[in-house]
Image (tube, rainbow, N blue to C red):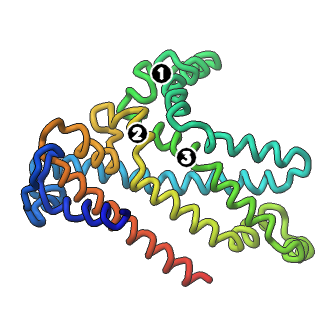
Amino acid sequence: MGLYTVGYGFALSFATWNGFTPNWTWVGLDNYADLLWRSPVYAPRVRHAALNTLWVMIASPALTVAVSFPLAVLLNRVRRLQSVLRSVYFLPYVTSGVAVFFAWQYILQPDGAINYLLDSVGLGSLSQPQGWLGNPSTAMPTMIAVTVWGHVPVAMLLYLTGLQGIDRSVLEAAELDGAGWWRTNASVIWPLVRPITAIVMLLNLRESLQGFQTFLVMTNGGPGDHTNVLGLEAYRLAFLKNLAPTLGLASALGWILFAAALVLALINLRALRSKT
């Protein structure tokens, strides 16, 4: 069944079909050409979504590593209540995604908690009268921040597992050599957890490239198309074009995303092997 579904979707990427008529119309590579450069309707939207996706792919993995590694280092030094704190940090990952996204929407509204907090501490000039998701200038950075918030728990636990597996004699040797806390983490611990960093980066890149649920629930690509990403564009082509024959385009875009994810995985694997 799985192979049939994959084969069916791949064949559909070379055809046009609206999901209702009994027959497909075979078009060859036209769907791919229309998405990438030929169509004045679809190609500009795909390019714009690709640029938004690129921003997410750059910012989300980098910020996830920047937040989760120091958090894991600090949590690893805690001796009391470590299991409790670990559960608290992991809570965003196990909480129902849709419920969390709606909660974020409420917090980010014009009369939401973030604007209220800024006003209460005298930083009202930073508040967003349109809401953080309604302002084109802040919508994408806000969505990236929410995405990172959801990715940090898994990354933090991966780093924590790696930190707890480091031989204590290595750290003791660094201390005997006079390395302080910062130098030990930067020059000893960080290189030792490099494989974990590669895994965290790969997971975040894949999710940034193919994931779209957060954007669908919170902004649906708005305002305008400022938060439209490739995964969301594929969803729109598949389900939001009424009876237009765009399922083939959606399938073609899905396969383009799959090819990009595969290339990224191979590059990441090669880079990881070259450093070990």
How crowded is the residue under tag 2: few (<14 C-alpha within 10 Å), some, or many (20+)? many
Which quarter of the rendered picture does the N terminus lie within?
bottom left
**How far apart are the alpha carbons under marks 2 and 1?**
16 Å
On residue 215, which mark appears? 2
The vertical placement of 122 against 268, above or below, is above
> Relative to 256, is 95 on the left or the right?
right
The amino acid type found where label 1 is placed reads Gln
Q: Is residue 136 above or below residue 90?
A: above
Residue 109's label in the rendered image is 1
Residue 172 shown left or right of residue 252 in the figure: right
Q: Residue at x 32, y 31 (%)?
A: 223
The picture quadrant where one finds residue 24 is bottom left
Amino acid found under the numbered disc labelled 3: Val
- The C terminus lies in which quarter of the figure? bottom right
As measured in the structure, the alpha-carbon distance from the residue carrying label 1 to the one carrying label 3 is 19 Å
Tell me, for residue 148, which label it has, or none: 3
